[in-house]
Image (spheres, grey):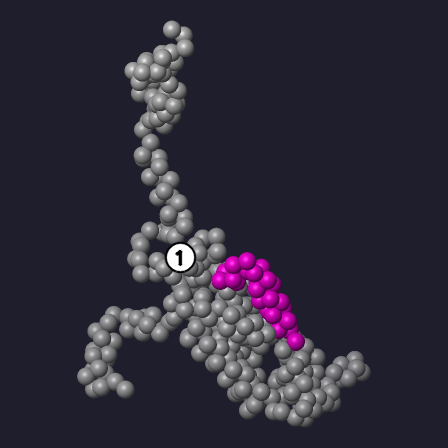
Amino acid sequence: MLTGQAVFRVRALLSHSPEPRYYLNRAMAPSLAQAYRRRWWMAGSAVLENLLFSAVLLGWGSLLIMLKSEGFYSHLCTENGTVDSNLTVWEFGDWPSCVEQEEMLNLGFTIGSFLLSAATLPLGILMDKYGPRPLRLVGSACFAFSCAMIAAATYDPTVLSILIFVAVAFNGFGGICLTFTSLMLPNMFGNIRSTILSIMIGSYASSAVTFPGVKLIYDAGVSFRVIMWVWAGLACLVCLNCFLNWPLEAFPAPEEISYTKKMKLSSLALDHKVTGDRFYSHMTAVGQRLSQTPCTMDRPCQLTASKTTGSAQSTIPFRRSVCSLSSCGVSSPWR
């Protein structure tokens, strides 16, 4: 436990710091080396999170049935209303249902699916600037907020049906945040990078079966309100998992830097934008170029001169060899 003096120092540091939340978040976030050791846990949890929280709006048909059963926009339907002798109002559980109701709810699906796809451009820009950790925290929070909003709207659907548009918008944006950030995890797996990437994409596409699975639970007698509140709680666990295991730094690609070298050089603070293997190879090439002497007509290349000197020393003239034999007292056979 912290003593009173330690607590005072922490409070003083946070109060005098210009950005206390930033430094606290940086202290709580794991390093890239720690994230690399937890990569299998992060990948497994990301697959499960994609199945339950990413593109669940693709299973809109099952959610539509549950929303109609809960009376969302049922006030648009009038009892015994007919158009051209065709019945347009029918009973759907305890609430009336009609074509106008379906059209209004399908408009919500259009908004959510649009954000699920159109948000990729700004997300790419934000990820390059801030990394995947803050985007994943925001995405999980948005998904939890959307589920809580749907659950709250079930208390009075006649008045609160409008909340479904805001809920599906947050649902689509939060889902694409979770999907987009999980696509960075395969960078930590080297030779099986493509395999992990295919699993991530497959889990994203397979999330369309989430709402049909929820409908099976709903048909078993579980309240739709309870399901949404539990789902919101699970989304909060996703936020907690990201806060504890995802680093602040972006995951570098395998061709950019080796993770083992990154861990060894983690204590170095370089201001260069070119770091790692690229920085080493660049400096090596520059050093080799600077060490070479420029070649001119009056001044031949140093490498050529050294080669010429070496070849001249390796080739001994015949006259010198004869003189050396005479000085050693060996008689020449040509005398």
Magenta residue check for 208 = yes
Residue 268 x/y as whole percent: 31, 58
Residue at image point 46% right, 76% down: 241
Which residue range is magenta in the image?
Answer: 186-209
Mark 1 lies on a secondary structure that is helix
Amino acid type, label 1: Lys
Q: Is residue 231 visible?
A: yes
Residue 192 forms part of the magenta stretch:
yes
Q: Is residue 15 visible?
A: no
Q: Nearer the viewer, residue 224 or 333?
A: 333
In this view, which residue lies farthest toward the left?
5
Residue occupying image coordinates x 31% and y 54%: 270
Residue 200 lies, with reference to residue 148, above or below; the image says: above
Name of the residue lying farthest toward the right: 85
Residue 144 in the image, given as x and y percentages of width and height: 50, 80
Residue 53's spot in the image, x, y percent? 56, 75
Is the residue 173 above or below the residue 222 in the image?
A: above
> Is the residue 184 above or below the residue 169 in the image?
above
Pointer 1 local density, CA inside 10 Å: few below 14, some 14–19, many at least 20: few
What's the magenta bit mostly, secondary-structure-wise? helix
Query: What is the quadrant of residue 312 in the picture?
Result: top left
Residue assigned mark 1: 261
Please tell me which residue is depicted at 41% across the width and 69% down the height of the picture.
34
